[in-house]
Amino acid sequence: MNKKYFETIYILFKKELMSYFNSPIAYIFIGVFLVTGNWLFFKNFFLIGEASMRGYFELLPWIFLFLCPAITMRLWSEEKKAGTIEFLLTLPVTDWQVVWGKFLGALAFLSIALATTFTLPITIASLGNLDWGPVIGSYIGSLLLGGSYLSLGLFISSLTKNQIIAFVLGLAACFGFFIVGANFVLMGAPQFLVPIMNFLGLGNHFYNIAKGVIDTKDLIYYFSFIFIFLWLNARMIESRGWK
């Protein structure tokens, strides 16, 4: 891979990121994300009377369940419906470059949305003694969890021309991977499947990192999850399954 390879990814990434902010969609998403998260969090914050963001980061994965599929549902579906995918894939770019450009654009947008919440820990720290370790860990975990949701949603978007179907399937798939390792699911599972389901659960790895302890196995899991679904996305595009 030479310098031009990464320059092409950067151009595609910038195009995808700017496409969000060239329409009201970015501002609507970020506005809904902030209002929903802040309202749900502060609804109980003053009742608990504790300078902690634990409640916010317990809510965030569930908010991401709706936000991430909404971000990715159009990335391939819209290209197919508008017929621009044929033009895009005849340009002197590889399938991997296009996939990386779309994924990184979506991840950057999600990161911007997440960055708008930085005022929360600053405000809480001014009200009490906030433990910054779990807060930093939770932000890192949120970004990794969001990246996993996005890679899965991007792959699903490549399977259909309909954005609504892409959103619903993306939501269902993300939900399934998030709760597969939850205790209430494991209680009803066959014993031999419990270790596998426990490992596969996106939520388990998120809550591990949110404790403020960043374990290598959790990082490897998230990076592997993201890579696998980006690889599947590239294979889908390479096979020209959109025809």
Image (cartoon, helix red, strand yellow):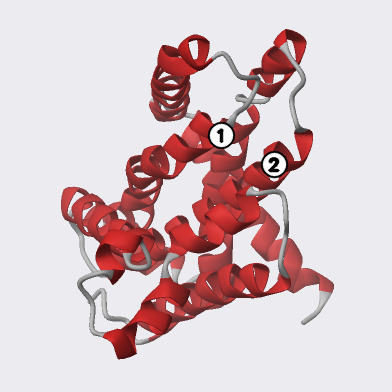
Residue plotted at (40% across, 47% down): 68
Report helix, strand or loop for mark 1.
helix
Whether the residues at callouts 1 and 2 have beta carbons within 8 Å, the answer is yes
* Crowd class of label 1 (few under 14; some 14 to 19; many from 20; radius 10 Å): some
Q: Earlier in the sequence, mark 1 or mark 2?
A: 1
Q: Which residue is mark 1?
A: 54
Where residue 165 appears, as percent x and y from the top left, is 16, 55
Q: Which mark is residue 190?
A: none
Does 56 appear above or below 17?
above
Q: Which residue is mark 2?
A: 134
- Which of the 4 image quarters holds residue 110? top right
Relative side of 65 to 163, left or right: right
- Which of the 4 image quarters holds residue 232? bottom left
Where residue 33 appears, as percent x and y from the top left, is 43, 27
Relative side of 122 to 89, left or right: right
Residue plotted at (37% across, 77% down): 197
- Which of the 4 image quarters holds residue 100? bottom right
* 3D distance between C-alphas at marks 1 and 2: 8 Å
Three-letter amino acid code of the residue under disc 1: Arg
Report helix, strand or loop for mark 2.
helix
Three-letter amino acid code of the residue under disc 2: Pro
Where residue 59 appears, as percent x and y from the top left, is 43, 35
Residue plotted at (83% across, 71% down): 3
Camera-side residue of 54 and 4: 54
Camera-side residue of 243 and 51: 51
Does 234 appear above or below 83?
below
Where residue 99 appears, as percent x and y from the top left, is 51, 67
